[in-house]
Image: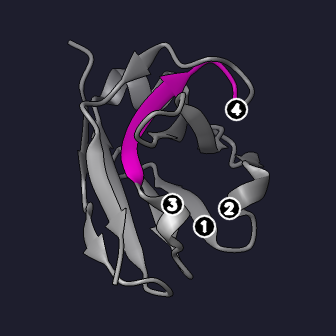
């Protein structure tokens, strides 16, 4: 069974940091690239970052230099470290699995809310 389970969302002040985690079933993690998407109210879902099995990276321009995606293959877990958060980063963040770091997602997690507000 395909499972992607996110955690780590919450409320943070502008300029603060959060780390999201996504635990994936072993079958997914060993085959696919992993990613994070987000959807803000009234907007379409958009790519935040993706990482291949070999560690190749793809970031949205809006988060470059602030967010870092990484994966722990021993724990079947992918992380998104978010620093210097801005109010416009407020969204539901989804963990995804896809063929490559440039592909559309094949699988989605349930999402975790990130709110950046003072």
105 or 23, nearer to the observer: 105
Q: Are marks 2 and 1 in contact (CB under 8 Å)?
A: yes
Please name the residue shown 74% across and 73% down the image.
65
* Quarter of the image that includes the N terminus: top left
Mark 4 or mark 1: whose residue is earlier in sequence: 1
Front tag of 1 and 3: 3
Mark 1 or mark 3: whose residue is earlier in sequence: 1
Mark 3 or mark 4: whose residue is earlier in sequence: 3
Give the CA distance from mark 2 to mark 1.
Answer: 6 Å
5 or 116, nearer to the observer: 116
Front tag of 2 and 3: 3
Residue range of the region highlighted in magenta in the rendering: 91-101
Label 2: which residue?
Answer: 63
Please name the residue shown 36% across and 84% down the image.
13
Label 3: which residue?
Answer: 89
Mark 2 or mark 3: whose residue is earlier in sequence: 2
Q: How far across and down, in percent of the image, does residue 57 sit?
A: 74, 48
């Amino acid at each position: 069974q395909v499972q992607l389970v996110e955690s780590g969302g919450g409320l943070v002040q502008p300029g603060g940091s959060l780390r999201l985690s996504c635990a994936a079933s072993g079958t997914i993690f060993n085959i696919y690239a992993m990613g994070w998407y987000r959807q803000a109210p009234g907007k379409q879902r958009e790519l935040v970052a993706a990482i291949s099995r070999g560690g190749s990276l793809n970031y949205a321009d809006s988060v470059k230099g602030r967010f870092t995606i990484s994966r722990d293959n021993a724990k079947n877990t992918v992380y998104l470290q978010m620093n210097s958060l801005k109010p416009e980063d407020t969204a539901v963040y989804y963990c995804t699995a896809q063929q490559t770091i440039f592909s559309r997602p094949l699988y989605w997690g349930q999402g975790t809310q990130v709110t950046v507000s003072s």
